[in-house]
Amino acid sequence: MAATALRRPHYRRDQCRSRKASYNVASSRGSRGLSLPDSKLERGGHSATGPQGPPFANAVVDWVTTLNPGDNATVSVFFDGSNVRFQFGIPRGSNGTNGNDGAPGAQGPPGEVTSAQLTAAINGTSMNSNGVATLDTVPSDPPTFADYEALRAKVNELIGALRRV
């Protein structure tokens, strides 16, 4: 920033301090300018224009504070002899409403299975039925008690083979 003469800026709110005086600055929202109670001003006649003040090279923001929603924004500004220094208070916005849920995402990749998990899954399934022989006998006509007994035994053998351990 090029060195220029300090000019009195328009202040929004809070405080303005210079090397010679301290002023409380308050203005309504949207208005600009310096507003002082009449009781603090001494009225006098016109005098000669004084010398130009020292130039400044920097405008410095000392800090920014977050205020509660609904609070008025604040700013403090003062000249320290070479820098114009600012301190801001900015209200955060009110919490908004939650939006709608988004569309479901794509199916993710399958997960990894450990050897122990695979063994546990196999052990939890039915036993292999390959050990059960087929029922190749032809029942008599009419079926006898022995035919029914052979069929019952084979069904029980198959059910036992298919049960989980």
Image (cartoon, grey):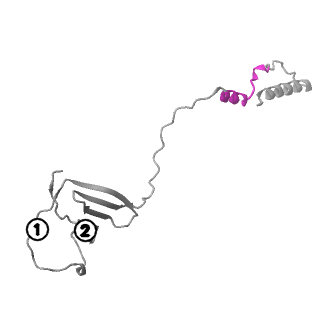
Residue located at (48% from left, 43% from top): 104
User: Image quadrant of residue 9?
Assistant: bottom left
**Residue 161, relative to residue 8: is it above or below?**
above
Classify residue 83 as left or right of residue 143: left
Q: Residue 50 — which label?
A: 1
The answer to which of marks 1 and 2 sits earlier in the sequence is 2
Residue 61 or residue 19, whichever sits in front? 19
Please name the amino acid that badge 2 sits on: Gly
**Residue 92 appears left or right of 83:** right
Q: Is residue 54 left or right of residue 154?
A: left
Residue 159, given in percent of the width and then of the height, sits at 80, 29
Q: Tag 1's secondary structure?
A: loop
Give me the residue at 45% from left, 52% from top: 100
Query: Quick one: label 1, few (<14), some, or many (20+) residues within 10 Å?
Result: few
| Front residue of 78 and 33 | 78
- Note whether residue 51 is visible: yes
Region in magenta = 116-132
Q: Amino acid at mark 1?
A: Gly
* Distance between the alpha carbons at the discs numbered 1 and 2: 32 Å
**Picture coordinates of residue 152, whole percent (x, y):** 85, 28
Residue 26: where, in percent of width, then height?
Answer: 27, 71
Mark linked to residue 30: 2
Residue 22 is drawn in which quadrant?
bottom left
148 or 58, which is in the foreground? 58
